[in-house]
């Protein structure tokens, strides 16, 4: 089992490592076969996380280095929101989920934004239980999906933001009431954020099914994260 003490040490090491990375350096931007981008910082963060996974006996499953999803696993998006990184926009995050088993309630997760210093972990237990804003809920969606015109309902209060991992951490912290994606997501995109949300009573639904285990490489859309009181309305809406 991965303890919270080990998790907090990992977060401290991660913060220190990111402090040593400079956006002034050549990002060495490359285009991947799926037409997304990767930078040298993505790779450096991936290598950093892989070293920690190996030291703890966890299989490594990362956007930049993956083959078979085997448990115990460290599931990593080294920097979710590479487009935001390239633009210098503070809407990206390091997303790390330590999963001894596929059960969402097990393990340790952290989402860390190196631009702002914002970090949320599964060790940060909120003392009060939140209720959803059922009258006028605020949702966060993908900036790319918004720009592509995927959201037709202009009456909904939707806020475009980069990085699904960052959006899920903001949802877990109470910044919005739900997060929606109308495109499929890889497990490394959403594992850590989903664990943070689940701990705070927020469900995940994928392709019309409630998700309680993180054992798939890819999750179908629509993807919705919200408290149970909002889920029926949001499923009908999206």
Image (cartoon, rainbow, N blue to C red):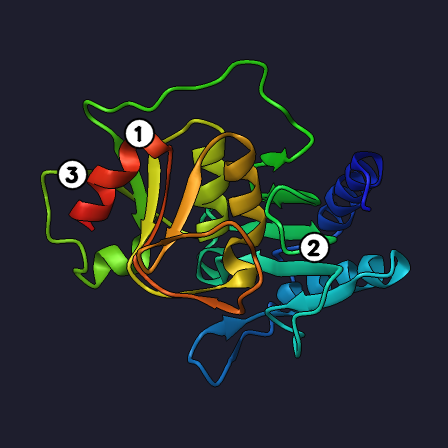
Residue 149, quarter of picture: bottom left
Q: Which residue is drawn at 43% across and 19% down?
A: 130
Task: Give residue 183's position: percent from left, percent from top.
Answer: 32, 64
The reply to whether residue 190 is in sight is yes
**Residue pointed to by mark 2:** 101
Is 188 on the left-hand or right-hand side of 84?
right
* Disc assigned to residue 156: 3
Q: Decide: few, some or many residues near mark 2? Use Cα within 10 Å; few <14, some 14-19, many ≥20.
A: some
Q: Residue at x 71, y 45 (%)?
A: 107
Picture residue at 85% right of the left edge, 63% below the top: 54
Q: Which of the two residues, 135 or 111, is positioned nearer the viewer here?
A: 135
Is residue 233 shown left or right of residue 103? left
- Of the two numbered discs 2 and 3 on the same chain, state the one appearing first in sequence: 2
Snapshot quadrant of residue 34: bottom left
Q: Nearer the viewer, residue 208 or 40?
A: 208
Rendered view: 86 above or below 158: below
Q: In what element is the residue under mark 1?
A: helix
SS of the residue at dot 2?
loop
Marks 3,1: beta carbons within 8 A: no
Query: In the displayed image of the protein, which residue is found farthest to the top?
Result: 128
Closer to the N terminus: mark 2 or mark 1?
2
Circles 2 and 1, Cβ within 8 Å, touching? The answer is no
Q: Can residue 158 be seen in this view?
A: no
Judge the density around disc 1: few (<14), some (14-19), many (≥20) Cα neighbours within 10 Å: few
Q: Nearer the viewer, residue 33 or 101?
A: 101
Q: Are marks 2 and 3 in contact (CB under 8 Å)?
A: no
Residue 229 disc label: 1
Q: Distance between the residues labelled 2 and 1?
A: 28 Å
């Amino acid at each position: 089992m991965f303890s919270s003490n080990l998790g907090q040490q990992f977060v401290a090491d991660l913060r220190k490592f990111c402090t040593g990375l400079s956006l002034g350096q050549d990002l060495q931007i490359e285009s991947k076969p799926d037409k997304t981008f990767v930078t040298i910082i993505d790779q450096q963060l991936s290598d950093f996380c892989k070293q920690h996974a190996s030291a703890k006996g966890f299989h490594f499953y990362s956007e930049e280095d993956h083959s078979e999803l085997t448990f115990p696993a460290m599931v990593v998006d080294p920097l979710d929101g590479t487009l935001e990184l390239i633009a210098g926009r503070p809407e990206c995050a390091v997303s790390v989920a330590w999963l001894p088993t596929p059960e969402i309630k097990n393990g340790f997760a952290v989402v860390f934004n190196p631009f702002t210093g914002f970090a949320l972990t599964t060790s940060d237990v909120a003392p009060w239980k939140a209720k959803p804003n059922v009258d006028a809920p605020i949702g966060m969606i993908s900036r790319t999906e918004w720009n592509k015109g995927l959201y037709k309902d202009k009456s909904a209060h939707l806020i475009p933001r980069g990085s699904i991992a960052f959006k899920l951490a903001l949802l877990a912290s109470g910044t919005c009431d739900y997060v929606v994606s109308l495109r499929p997501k890889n497990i490394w995109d959403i594992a850590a954020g989903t664990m943070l949300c689940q701990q705070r009573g927020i469900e995940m639904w994928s392709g019309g099914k409630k998700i309680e285990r993180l054992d798939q490489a890819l999750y179908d859309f629509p993807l919705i994260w919200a408290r149970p009181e909002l889920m029926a309305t949001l499923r009908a809406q999206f």
